[in-house]
Image: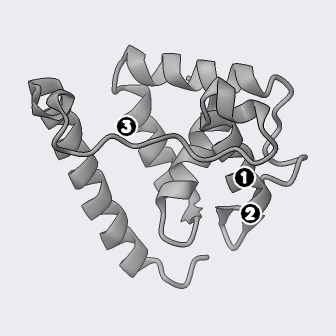
Amino acid sequence: MNFQVTVRKILVSYPDGCAVMTDLKSDMAILATSGREWAERTRRLAARVPELDILSQGLVERLNGGWRITEKGRSVLEFMEARPAERMTESAAPAVEWPASSPAASTPLAARRSGRSQRLQRRRAARERARAKAC
């Protein structure tokens, strides 16, 4: 699992792009134990920007006991997630998300991921309400 990519993917999933360290650690632990697919995906994304350093390049900033993704961090993440043909253009669009009604969404694995994602979102929402002052 690539730490640099994982941190940005976690931060971008929060409503304001900010998470406290305990939330980051918790989410990283979930992703680290979620299987090979996540590790392979983050390696592929990291290979697209080989000299990635989220803090020194200003992609993530530290504040009030947490980290927040910057606009530059969001745009670099979009670039990394864009398909190769899209990355060649000047303005890369974000990766296409498949609708929930696709055949892949009806598989048991997709259902487990969906349930896990919903639980993770509910936990994040609860933590966000409890820690509104942190970021």
Looking at the image, how many numbered discs can be counted on the residues? 3
Q: Position of residue 33 (x, y in %)?
A: 36, 26
Q: Residue at x 43, y 46 (%)?
A: 27
**Few, some or many residues within 10 Å of mark 1 (<14, 14–19, 20+):** some
Q: Residue at x 78, y 44 (%)?
A: 54
Observer-nearest of 12 and 62: 12
Callout 2–callout 1 Cβ contact below 8 Å: yes
Asked if residue 61 can be seen in this view, the reply is no
Q: Position of residue 89 (x, y in %)?
A: 77, 38
Quadrant position of the C terminus in the picture:
bottom right
- Mark 2 or mark 3, whichever is nearer to me: 2
* Left or right side of 119 for 65: right
Q: Which residue is mark 2?
A: 71
Q: Residue at x 19, y 36 (%)?
A: 102
Callout 1–callout 3 Cβ contact below 8 Å: no
Q: Residue at x 34, y 27 (%)?
A: 34
Q: CA distance from mark 2 to mark 1?
A: 6 Å
Q: CA distance from mark 1 to mark 3?
A: 25 Å
Q: Which mark is residue 30?
A: 3
SS class of the residue under badge 1?
helix
The numbered mark, 1 or 3, whose residue comes first in the sequence reads 3
Q: Position of residue 53 (x, y in %)?
A: 83, 37
Q: Which mark is residue 75?
A: 1
Relative to 66, residue 95 above or below: above
- The amino acid at mark 1 is Ser
- The amino acid at mark 2 is Glu
- The amino acid at mark 3 is Ile
* Left or right side of 53 for 109: left
